[in-house]
Image (cartoon, grey):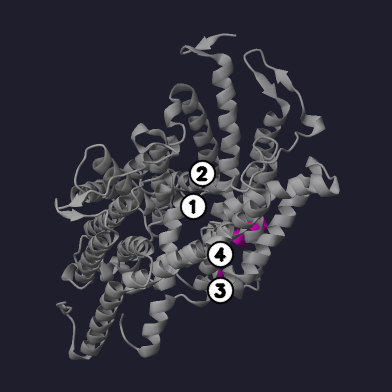
Amino acid sequence: MERVLDPIATSADRPKARAEVVAFVVMVAALIVAPFFLYPLFLMQALCFALFACAFNLLIGYVGLLSFGHALYFGWASYLAAHAAKIWGLPPELAILTGAATAAVLGVMAGSLAIRRQGIYFAMITLALAQMMYFVALQVPFTGGEDGIQAVPRGFMFGFLDLSNQMTMYAVVLVIFLAGFLFIHRIINSPFGEVLKAIRENETRAVSLGYKTDRYKLAAFVLSATLAGVAGGTKAIVFQLASLTDVHWAMSGEVVLMTLVGGLGTVFGPVVGAFVIIAMQNYLSAFDQWVFVIQGVIFVVCVLLFRRGIVGEFAHLLRIKL
Amino acid sequence: MFEIFGIPSQALFGQLLIGLINGSFYALLSLGLAVIFGMLNIINFTHGAQYMLGAFCAFFLLQYAGLGYWTALIVAPLAVGIFGMIIERLFLQWLYKLDHLYGLLLTFGLGLIIEGVFRNYFGSSGLPYRVPESLQGGQNLGFMFLPNYRAWVIVFSLFVCLATWFLIERTRLGAYLRAATENPTLVRAFGINVPRMITLTYGFGVGLAALAGVMAAPIYNVSPQMGADLIIVVFAVVVIGGMGSIMGAIVTGFGLGVVEGLTKVFFPEASNTVIFIIMAIVLLVRPAGLFGRGA
């Protein structure tokens, strides 16, 4: 991985950069070995949500915008990808791209409305718009209402990779996740990303420096929505299913929770958070009916005692940047 | 019986009535949100759960203590309000110096816990709650049949809303409250116990939600998720009205209820989404909200 130094980076930043490289190598190695020990379907689910959480974190962690409606992009991308693969018969790579494009269009529309207000209103607007599209998903016929779109074919990636093979599918999901992860890493370490962080720290000052902050915020919003769409589309292909669960506000809450648990504004936090929450859901499935209560308790504990999240606390302890 | 725009008057006025009732709940809930936000700088995501608690409180009082609607109308808001104050002392008070978003996340988590616990014990299906004896029956107004209970809900919510407006805008206590919203440090320097005022304000806002819950109990069934979806609509109402003005919250709440009711008559497919669509239009035309004082 080539690390792109910040324009303002000094020699003091280099050990921090090294920590990131080490962590990245460890993560990739762990993910390559993992399917030999763990259930691949669980890993693929976790990877899709990890990408979703990373996309969400791009907004909350680096622009300071809390979108409480990210299920909109995830869910609608998953519907369109499923529809493209099943009804239009598109190969999986084009199906996922269809999903991502849908999310991008929705991101432009919702984003340009939401950035008109700041702070808490931004969260309420994104939530309300997502709820609106939830009702639309409930009513339009192609989504299949309560049934969702089932039995989506996995097909052949690029015409020759047979995705019905669990390991091939895993490899594809891993590559998609890593590409998304590195893309986000590239965004936040680019000059564009520096402007985003400036907006997070002090928007008025960024405006006074001559940045058209609305354009930057919208661009970040659309990027985040699109990547959430990639995650949603991939999820639809992996599970061969797109359903109302993916567009419901509980899903928006879940991605917030993953990011919060892992660490807001950390590069690796959302990945760790996604694995923790998905593992919790899978291994605590005996307490299925308590899952919302448990999630609620984690929210409360994180906000009151543990605001840096797992990765954030760890990095703080070792005084490194992760 | 006559027709307006090809719609039988019974259907039109019936939906208008339902719209007004929903509007009273929107108004009460957005009023509570606005009062809480003004004082605590926290958007209370638990509001929907507290509305649900109000309804359940009325249900419990009837079921286990034999206490009827009129007692519940007083006891439930008090009980849920005190519960709210405990929440404020235990959790919320640690967040005032932090970014807004933590208040949102914490109250969202609390809402999940409360709703989750109730769903485990009472399932997803609703429990019925009778209309009180004294308000059963209705009036035939010639163009429509008006159930007494529904008329009561509209009149009483309007009264509570206006009383709240009077309390905040026209009394000494309200003046302290508004002053503390503007500059808490200065108000404290005058010897007023601002932290206690914050706790009481939260209790009051939560009490309003519980009151709405009690009034909703005989109309809708009492169910664990009755507040979850409602609160998102109320957020849209708050975005449309802006949280800066008490009267704005009341007018927007009732107005949007009516619009939603009319949509059910003329264009039923959009009745779920119309408030969100209005929100989008308002954001395009007047980003600060109809009664907002800037973002």
- Residue flagged by tag 4: what amino acid is it? Ile
Look at the image and say whether residue A220 sits in the magenta stretch. Answer: no
Estimate the spatial distance between the alpha carbons at disc 3 and disc 4, rounded to whole Å.
Answer: 22 Å
Q: Are marks 2 and 1 in contact (CB under 8 Å)?
A: yes
Q: Is residue A306 above or below residue A161?
A: below
Disc 3 is placed on an element classified as helix
Q: Chain of mark 1?
A: B
Can you tell which of label 4 and label 1 is closer to the viewer?
4
* Label 2 to label 3: alpha-carbon separation: 30 Å
Instruction: Tell me the amino acid under the disc marked 3.
Output: Trp
A317 relative to B269, above or below: below
Q: Residues within 10 Å of mark 3 (few under 14, many from 20)?
A: few
Range covered by the magenta-colored residues: B171-185
Report the disc number at residue B248.
2
Is B183 magenta? The answer is yes
Mark 1 crowd level (few <14, some 14–19, many ≥20, 10 Å Cα): many
* Residue at horizontal 68 percent and vertical 29 percent from the top: B151
Q: Are marks 2 and 3 in contact (CB under 8 Å)?
A: no
Indicate the secondary structure of the residue bearing disc 1.
loop
Disc 1 marks a residue whose amino acid type is Gly
Q: Which residue is mark 1?
A: B244
Give the residue pinned by disc 4: A294
- The disc placed on residue B94 is 3
